[in-house]
Protein backbone atom coordinates (compact mmCIF):
# COMPACT_ATOMS: atom_id res chain seq x y z
CA UNK A 1 0.00 0.00 0.00
CA UNK A 2 1.27 3.45 -0.92
CA UNK A 3 1.09 5.99 1.90
CA UNK A 4 0.52 9.60 0.78
CA UNK A 5 1.36 12.70 2.81
CA UNK A 6 -0.88 15.62 1.82
CA UNK A 7 -1.91 18.93 3.36
CA UNK A 8 -4.67 21.50 2.98
CA UNK A 9 -8.12 21.13 1.46
CA UNK A 10 -7.01 18.35 -0.89
CA UNK A 11 -5.89 16.24 2.09
CA UNK A 12 -9.12 16.82 4.02
CA UNK A 13 -11.26 15.95 0.99
CA UNK A 14 -9.36 12.74 0.24
CA UNK A 15 -9.20 11.84 3.93
CA UNK A 16 -12.98 12.15 4.30
CA UNK A 17 -13.51 10.01 1.19
CA UNK A 18 -11.23 7.32 2.59
CA UNK A 19 -12.99 7.34 5.98
CA UNK A 20 -16.37 6.99 4.27
CA UNK A 21 -14.95 4.01 2.34
CA UNK A 22 -13.98 2.33 5.61
CA UNK A 23 -10.26 3.17 5.52
CA UNK A 24 -7.91 4.49 8.21
CA UNK A 25 -6.32 7.96 7.96
CA UNK A 26 -3.69 9.69 10.12
CA UNK A 27 -4.55 13.28 11.03
CA UNK A 28 -3.00 16.05 13.13
CA UNK A 29 -4.21 17.36 16.47
CA UNK A 30 -2.70 19.82 18.93
CA UNK A 31 -1.57 16.93 21.19
CA UNK A 32 -0.17 14.24 18.86
CA UNK A 33 -1.18 12.83 15.47
CA UNK A 34 -4.11 10.40 15.53
CA UNK A 35 -4.79 7.20 13.57
CA UNK A 36 -8.46 7.66 12.73
CA UNK A 37 -11.37 5.62 11.46
CA UNK A 38 -15.17 5.60 11.64
CA UNK A 39 -15.97 5.12 15.33
CA UNK A 40 -19.31 3.49 14.49
CA UNK A 41 -17.86 0.85 12.12
CA UNK A 42 -16.49 -2.25 13.86
CA UNK A 43 -14.67 -3.40 10.73
CA UNK A 44 -12.86 -0.08 10.51
CA UNK A 45 -11.96 -0.24 14.21
CA UNK A 46 -10.31 -3.60 13.54
CA UNK A 47 -8.18 -1.93 10.83
CA UNK A 48 -6.97 0.67 13.36
CA UNK A 49 -5.85 -2.02 15.80
CA UNK A 50 -4.18 -3.94 12.97
CA UNK A 51 -2.31 -0.95 11.53
CA UNK A 52 -1.06 0.09 14.94
CA UNK A 53 -0.39 -3.40 16.30
CA UNK A 54 -2.44 -2.41 19.33
CA UNK A 55 -3.95 -4.93 21.78
CA UNK A 56 -7.73 -5.09 21.33
CA UNK A 57 -8.33 -4.65 25.08
CA UNK A 58 -6.90 -1.10 25.00
CA UNK A 59 -9.77 1.37 24.37
CA UNK A 60 -9.79 4.10 21.74
CA UNK A 61 -10.74 7.75 22.10
CA UNK A 62 -13.62 9.07 19.97
CA UNK A 63 -12.94 12.46 18.36
CA UNK A 64 -15.74 14.90 17.48
CA UNK A 65 -16.02 18.21 15.63
CA UNK A 66 -18.65 20.00 17.74
CA UNK A 67 -20.39 19.64 21.11
CA UNK A 68 -23.65 18.37 19.61
CA UNK A 69 -21.76 15.31 18.33
CA UNK A 70 -21.48 14.06 21.92
CA UNK A 71 -25.19 13.44 22.49
CA UNK A 72 -25.70 10.32 20.30
CA UNK A 73 -22.55 8.72 21.75
CA UNK A 74 -23.49 8.88 25.45
CA UNK A 75 -26.29 7.58 27.63
CA UNK A 76 -25.93 10.33 30.23
CA UNK A 77 -24.84 13.97 30.06
CA UNK A 78 -24.86 15.50 33.54
CA UNK A 79 -24.53 19.13 34.56
CA UNK A 80 -20.95 18.39 35.64
CA UNK A 81 -20.21 16.93 32.19
CA UNK A 82 -21.72 20.04 30.65
CA UNK A 83 -19.52 22.39 32.69
CA UNK A 84 -16.33 20.55 31.71
CA UNK A 85 -17.31 20.49 28.05
CA UNK A 86 -18.23 24.19 28.03
CA UNK A 87 -15.05 25.32 29.81
CA UNK A 88 -12.39 22.95 28.45
CA UNK A 89 -13.53 21.77 25.01
CA UNK A 90 -12.22 22.08 22.40
CA UNK A 91 -8.83 21.33 23.91
CA UNK A 92 -6.33 18.65 24.98
CA UNK A 93 -8.79 16.78 27.22
CA UNK A 94 -10.67 13.48 26.89
CA UNK A 95 -13.79 12.99 29.02
CA UNK A 96 -15.19 9.56 29.92
CA UNK A 97 -18.98 9.29 29.61
CA UNK A 98 -21.36 6.33 29.99
CA UNK A 99 -21.56 5.10 26.40
CA UNK A 100 -24.66 4.71 24.27
CA UNK A 101 -25.52 1.54 22.35
CA UNK A 102 -24.35 2.95 19.01
CA UNK A 103 -20.71 2.91 20.14
CA UNK A 104 -19.24 -0.53 19.31
CA UNK A 105 -17.72 -2.50 22.16
CA UNK A 106 -14.54 -2.77 20.07
CA UNK A 107 -14.00 0.98 20.52
CA UNK A 108 -14.27 0.84 24.31
CA UNK A 109 -12.64 -2.60 24.73
CA UNK A 110 -15.90 -3.81 26.27
CA UNK A 111 -16.07 -1.02 28.86
CA UNK A 112 -19.34 0.77 29.55
CA UNK A 113 -17.67 4.17 29.20
CA UNK A 114 -16.42 5.99 26.12
CA UNK A 115 -13.67 8.62 26.01
CA UNK A 116 -14.64 11.64 23.92
CA UNK A 117 -12.40 14.48 22.77
CA UNK A 118 -12.90 17.58 20.64
CA UNK A 119 -9.51 18.73 19.34
CA UNK A 120 -8.63 22.40 19.49
CA UNK A 121 -6.72 22.25 16.20
CA UNK A 122 -8.96 23.64 13.46
CA UNK A 123 -7.75 21.28 10.73
CA UNK A 124 -8.59 18.29 12.94
CA UNK A 125 -12.16 19.45 13.52
CA UNK A 126 -12.55 20.34 9.85
CA UNK A 127 -11.44 16.85 8.87
CA UNK A 128 -13.80 15.18 11.37
CA UNK A 129 -16.70 17.33 10.20
CA UNK A 130 -15.98 16.45 6.56
CA UNK A 131 -16.06 12.76 7.47
CA UNK A 132 -19.61 13.11 8.83
CA UNK A 133 -18.98 10.53 11.57
CA UNK A 134 -17.16 10.50 14.90
CA UNK A 135 -13.56 9.38 14.50
CA UNK A 136 -12.01 6.77 16.79
CA UNK A 137 -8.26 7.35 17.04
CA UNK A 138 -5.30 6.31 19.14
CA UNK A 139 -1.94 8.00 18.51
CA UNK A 140 -0.64 7.31 14.99
CA UNK A 141 2.44 5.31 15.94
CA UNK A 142 3.19 1.61 16.05
CA UNK A 143 2.18 0.20 19.44
CA UNK A 144 4.74 0.91 22.23
CA UNK A 145 6.61 3.44 20.04
CA UNK A 146 7.06 7.13 20.79
CA UNK A 147 3.93 9.06 19.85
CA UNK A 148 4.20 11.18 16.67
CA UNK A 149 4.10 14.97 16.68
CA UNK A 150 4.85 15.46 12.96
CA UNK A 151 3.64 13.84 9.74
CA UNK A 152 7.14 12.46 9.15
CA UNK A 153 7.01 10.67 12.53
CA UNK A 154 3.78 9.00 11.42
CA UNK A 155 5.35 7.99 8.11
CA UNK A 156 8.24 6.30 9.93
CA UNK A 157 5.80 3.92 11.65
CA UNK A 158 2.85 3.76 9.24
CA UNK A 159 4.43 3.69 5.77
CA UNK A 160 2.65 0.98 3.79
CA UNK A 161 0.05 0.40 6.53
CA UNK A 162 -2.36 3.26 5.80
CA UNK A 163 -3.29 5.18 2.62
CA UNK A 164 -3.01 8.78 3.84
CA UNK A 165 -1.35 11.07 6.38
CA UNK A 166 -2.83 14.57 6.64
CA UNK A 167 0.04 16.95 7.35
CA UNK A 168 -0.90 19.76 9.73
CA UNK A 169 2.60 20.70 10.86
CA UNK A 170 4.06 20.15 14.32
CA UNK A 171 1.70 19.36 17.20
CA UNK A 172 1.58 22.34 19.53
CA UNK A 173 1.07 20.56 22.88
CA UNK A 174 3.26 17.53 22.25
CA UNK A 175 1.84 14.88 24.63
CA UNK A 176 -1.48 13.06 24.67
CA UNK A 177 -4.65 14.57 26.11
CA UNK A 178 -5.57 14.54 29.77
CA UNK A 179 -8.10 11.74 30.36
CA UNK A 180 -10.68 12.41 33.08
CA UNK A 181 -13.39 10.07 34.33
CA UNK A 182 -16.50 12.03 35.32
CA UNK A 183 -18.66 8.97 36.05
CA UNK A 184 -17.72 8.68 39.75
CA UNK A 185 -18.47 10.85 42.77
CA UNK A 186 -15.11 12.64 42.47
CA UNK A 187 -13.80 13.26 38.93
CA UNK A 188 -10.60 11.24 38.45
CA UNK A 189 -7.68 11.92 36.13
CA UNK A 190 -6.68 8.62 34.54
CA UNK A 191 -3.91 10.09 32.38
CA UNK A 192 -2.29 13.47 33.06
CA UNK A 193 -1.77 15.98 30.28
CA UNK A 194 -1.75 19.69 29.49
CA UNK A 195 -5.12 20.19 31.21
CA UNK A 196 -4.00 19.94 34.83
CA UNK A 197 -5.81 18.87 37.97
CA UNK A 198 -5.87 22.50 39.10
CA UNK A 199 -7.61 23.57 35.88
CA UNK A 200 -10.20 20.83 36.30
CA UNK A 201 -10.75 21.62 39.97
CA UNK A 202 -11.65 25.19 39.02
CA UNK A 203 -14.52 23.76 36.96
CA UNK A 204 -15.76 20.80 39.03
CA UNK A 205 -14.64 21.62 42.59
CA UNK A 206 -12.50 18.59 43.46
CA UNK A 207 -10.44 16.21 41.34
CA UNK A 208 -8.59 13.01 42.14
CA UNK A 209 -5.23 12.80 40.34
CA UNK A 210 -3.88 9.65 38.69
CA UNK A 211 -1.78 9.18 41.84
CA UNK A 212 -4.84 9.24 44.10
CA UNK A 213 -4.40 12.76 45.49
CA UNK A 214 -7.53 14.89 45.79
CA UNK A 215 -7.11 18.49 44.63
CA UNK A 216 -9.79 21.05 45.32
CA UNK A 217 -10.21 24.53 43.82
CA UNK A 218 -9.34 27.77 46.13
CA UNK A 219 -9.85 3.57 32.74
CA UNK A 220 -8.32 4.92 29.85
CA UNK A 221 -5.72 4.65 27.05
CA UNK A 222 -2.08 4.53 28.08
CA UNK A 223 -2.63 2.83 31.44
CA UNK A 224 -2.19 -0.89 30.83
CA UNK A 225 0.63 -1.35 28.34
CA UNK A 226 4.12 -0.05 27.77
CA UNK A 227 3.97 3.22 25.82
CA UNK A 228 6.09 5.98 24.40
CA UNK A 229 9.34 3.98 24.21
CA UNK A 230 12.25 4.86 21.91
CA UNK A 231 14.09 2.07 20.08
CA UNK A 232 17.20 2.40 22.26
CA UNK A 233 17.51 2.03 26.06
CA UNK A 234 16.47 5.07 28.05
CA UNK A 235 16.95 6.03 31.71
CA UNK A 236 16.07 9.03 33.86
CA UNK A 237 18.78 10.87 35.80
CA UNK A 238 17.71 12.16 39.21
CA UNK A 239 19.85 15.30 38.84
CA UNK A 240 22.63 16.73 36.65
CA UNK A 241 25.39 15.09 38.71
CA UNK A 242 23.80 11.68 38.17
CA UNK A 243 23.26 12.47 34.48
CA UNK A 244 26.93 13.34 33.90
CA UNK A 245 28.12 10.28 35.83
CA UNK A 246 25.81 7.98 33.85
CA UNK A 247 26.89 9.56 30.55
CA UNK A 248 30.58 9.04 31.35
CA UNK A 249 29.90 5.48 32.53
CA UNK A 250 28.23 4.63 29.22
CA UNK A 251 31.10 6.20 27.24
CA UNK A 252 33.51 3.98 29.21
CA UNK A 253 31.38 1.01 28.11
CA UNK A 254 31.92 2.11 24.47
CA UNK A 255 28.33 3.36 24.14
CA UNK A 256 27.11 6.50 22.36
CA UNK A 257 24.88 8.19 24.96
CA UNK A 258 22.85 11.35 24.49
CA UNK A 259 21.23 13.59 27.10
CA UNK A 260 17.79 15.18 27.04
CA UNK A 261 18.05 18.29 29.20
CA UNK A 262 16.53 21.71 29.76
CA UNK A 263 18.22 24.75 28.23
CA UNK A 264 19.34 26.11 31.57
CA UNK A 265 21.66 23.11 32.16
CA UNK A 266 23.61 23.18 28.88
CA UNK A 267 26.64 25.05 30.20
CA UNK A 268 27.66 22.34 32.68
CA UNK A 269 27.63 19.48 30.15
CA UNK A 270 30.96 20.29 28.53
CA UNK A 271 31.35 18.44 25.22
CA UNK A 272 28.80 15.74 26.05
CA UNK A 273 26.10 15.18 23.42
CA UNK A 274 22.62 16.53 24.20
CA UNK A 275 19.27 17.69 22.87
CA UNK A 276 17.81 20.84 24.38
CA UNK A 277 14.18 20.23 25.41
CA UNK A 278 13.61 23.96 25.87
CA UNK A 279 13.51 26.47 28.71
CA UNK A 280 9.82 26.70 29.61
CA UNK A 281 7.64 23.82 30.79
CA UNK A 282 5.46 24.19 27.69
CA UNK A 283 8.49 23.97 25.39
CA UNK A 284 9.58 20.79 27.16
CA UNK A 285 6.10 19.33 26.76
CA UNK A 286 5.97 20.20 23.07
CA UNK A 287 9.48 18.83 22.37
CA UNK A 288 9.72 15.64 24.45
CA UNK A 289 8.47 13.10 21.89
CA UNK A 290 10.28 14.71 18.96
CA UNK A 291 13.48 14.72 21.00
CA UNK A 292 13.14 11.01 21.81
CA UNK A 293 12.69 10.19 18.12
CA UNK A 294 15.60 12.43 17.09
CA UNK A 295 17.82 10.91 19.80
CA UNK A 296 17.21 7.27 18.87
CA UNK A 297 18.51 7.96 15.34
CA UNK A 298 21.95 9.17 16.49
CA UNK A 299 22.71 7.39 19.78
CA UNK A 300 22.35 4.00 21.45
CA UNK A 301 21.50 5.17 24.98
CA UNK A 302 19.28 8.06 26.12
CA UNK A 303 19.57 9.81 29.48
CA UNK A 304 16.74 12.21 30.32
CA UNK A 305 17.04 14.61 33.22
CA UNK A 306 14.25 14.33 35.80
CA UNK A 307 11.92 17.17 34.92
CA UNK A 308 10.69 19.19 37.86
CA UNK A 309 8.34 22.15 37.80
CA UNK A 310 4.66 22.68 37.15
CA UNK A 311 1.84 20.17 36.69
CA UNK A 312 2.72 20.21 32.98
CA UNK A 313 6.18 18.85 33.82
CA UNK A 314 4.59 16.15 35.96
CA UNK A 315 2.51 15.11 32.94
CA UNK A 316 5.66 14.98 30.82
CA UNK A 317 7.44 12.89 33.48
CA UNK A 318 4.50 10.46 33.39
CA UNK A 319 5.44 9.75 29.76
CA UNK A 320 9.21 9.80 30.32
CA UNK A 321 9.02 7.26 33.14
CA UNK A 322 6.90 4.97 30.95
CA UNK A 323 9.44 5.33 28.14
CA UNK A 324 12.31 4.41 30.46
CA UNK A 325 10.47 1.58 32.17
CA UNK A 326 10.73 3.59 35.39
CA UNK A 327 14.53 3.25 35.58
CA UNK A 328 16.11 6.16 37.49
CA UNK A 329 19.86 6.57 38.01
Image: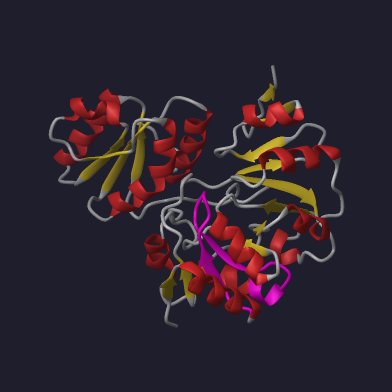
Does 237 sit left or right of 318 as displayed?
left
Q: Nearer the viewer, residue 289 or 296?
A: 289
Does 215 sit left or right of 77 as displayed?
left
Number of marks in the rendered image: 0
- Indicate whether 305 appears above or below 169: above
On the image, the x and y values in percent for residue 287 come to 38, 43
- Indicate whether 323 appears above or below 56: above
Magenta segment: 22-45
On the image, the x and y values in percent for residue 58 come to 63, 57
Does 108 sit left or right of 31 as displayed?
right
Decide if residue 138 is in sight here. no
Q: Nearer the viewer, residue 239 or 18?
A: 18
On the image, the x and y values in percent for residue 240 come to 28, 25
Q: Nearer the viewer, residue 160 or 84?
A: 84
Identity of the residue drawn at 43% across and 71% down: 6
Q: Residue lying farthest top?
A: 218
Q: Is residue 30 magenta?
A: yes
On the image, the x and y values in percent for residue 219 come to 69, 46
Rendered image quadrant of residue 75: bottom right
- The quarter in which the C terminus is drawn is top left
Identity of the residue drawn at 63% across and 34% down: 210
Amino acid sequence: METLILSGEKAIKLGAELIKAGEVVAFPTETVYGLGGNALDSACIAKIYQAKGRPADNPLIVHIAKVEDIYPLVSEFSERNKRVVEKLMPGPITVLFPKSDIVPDSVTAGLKTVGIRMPKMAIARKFIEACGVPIAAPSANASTRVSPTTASHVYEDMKGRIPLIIDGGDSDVGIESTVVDLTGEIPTILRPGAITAEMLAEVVGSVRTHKGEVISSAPAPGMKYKHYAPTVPMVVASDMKALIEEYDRQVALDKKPLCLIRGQAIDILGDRKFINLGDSDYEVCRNIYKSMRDAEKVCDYIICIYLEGSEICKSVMNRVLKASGGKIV
